[in-house]
Amino acid sequence: MGDVGGGVCTGESVGGGTDVWSSSGPAAADHLVVMVHGILGSTADWKFAADQFVKMLPDKVIVHCSERNMYGLTLDGVDVMGERLAEEVTEVINKWPDLQRISFIAHSVGGLVARYAIGRLYRPPERKSLEEPLDTLCDDSKRGTICGLQAMNFITVATPHLGSRGNKQVPFLLGVTAIEKVASCVIHWIFRRTGKHLFLTDNDEGKPPLLQRMVEDCDDLHFMSALQAFKRRVVYSNVGYDHIVGWRTSCIRRNSELPKWEDSSSEKYPHIVYEEYSAGSRNDKCPSDSFMNDDCDVLEEKLVTGLTRLSWERVDVSFHNISIQRFAAHSVIQVKDPFMHSEGADVIQHMIDHFLLA
């Protein structure tokens, strides 16, 4: 354990992860914030954000930077990583017995891993009778929990919720359909099982692709019930210059729903260019012809329709007006490196300012 200055202490957690808390002691903090890195990442990727959360919310939160899926382990598949993360979170909760609430903040593929993990950790609410439907239990006392803790904020940052196979979903493929089709066939050579999940080419035992299964409760994995348990669901997305994850897949919108944005006039959040709250829709009908075009296939529409049954806060980010850092937008939005990616600090500040504590 060590004091890193500014009222922040860090210590090695279970399994080698990193816990961050206020130097005044963790006793008063009852809110666990789990930060999950992306592909080929490590606990260090969230260090800046973890420190800022504890500095700005002293005695309120304990931050755990996940370590169970670092570096090459991120290629093992979303499901395998999700199971590891669920086990890790359970161990962390057992370490801090006074915890009451839990939130997740995840970057890139880590957002999919977190969605899988909460599906495993979800505990349904108690019902007075078996006839009482789960989806009518709206008050906090009857919400489901995540491993026994009240679910507060589920935040993803540049996460490919709709996968990576659609047109312009991986911008560095230049939107060329032929290249995108080839990539979907060979991506597993590079990113192994995770690549199959991202490009929706997996069919384990004849099952639908994992990301499709994750827009429903599936067997003993309560993917959507777990998401619904959170008081807030938020997606932060790069509108451009993110060469890894496209805008549409990270903000869970159709092409026709992408907003026209303008430069920010905010001094506090100079890179937040658009915000909206979208209420959940119970429309489970097949996609209409107006949504079907060359840029959106049936499977992608199923993912959009499934996820937007729940409400989402969308925060769109642009680094187009900064110099060289904009070309690393996928890392800048997370402030992966405080020196190289410092322009994203206002995005982290926005997360903290809007973070729901209770």
Image: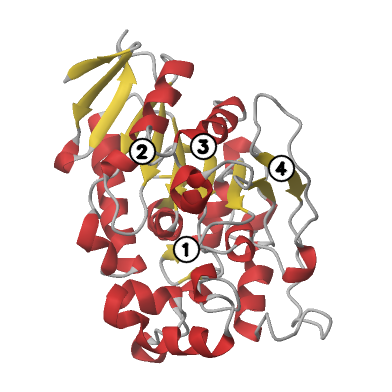
Q: Element type at marker 3? A: helix
Marks 4 and 3 sit apart, C-alpha to C-alpha, by 13 Å
Marks 4 and 2 sit apart, C-alpha to C-alpha, by 23 Å
Residue 352 in the image: x percent, y percent?
A: 54, 28
Q: Element type at marker 4? A: strand
Please tell me in which quadrant of the rendered image residue 202 appears: bottom left
Marks 4/2 in contact by CB < 8 Å: the verdict is no
Residue 321 in the image: x percent, y percent?
A: 64, 43
Marks 1/2 in contact by CB < 8 Å: the verdict is no
Instruction: Name the kind of residue labelled 3 in the image.
Output: Gly
| Nearest the eye: 240 or 292 | 240
Dot 4 or dot 2: first in sequence order is 4
Q: Residue at 56% x, 71% y: name it.
A: 169
Task: Say which residue label 3 marks.
Answer: 344
The label on residue 337 is 2
Task: Say which residue label 4 marks.
Answer: 273
Instruction: Name the kind of residue labelled 2 in the image.
Output: Asp
Task: Say which residue label 1 marks.
Answer: 244
Dot 1 or dot 4: first in sequence order is 1
Marks 1 and 4 sit apart, C-alpha to C-alpha, by 20 Å
Residue 116 in the image: x percent, y percent?
A: 41, 60
Marks 3 and 1 sit apart, C-alpha to C-alpha, by 17 Å
Q: Residue at 38% x, 31% y: name it.
A: 48
Dot 4 or dot 3: first in sequence order is 4
Please tell me in which quadrant of the rendered image residue 215 appears: bottom right
Q: In the image, is residue 277 above or below residue 299?
A: above
Residue 88 as seen in the image, left or right of residue 248: left
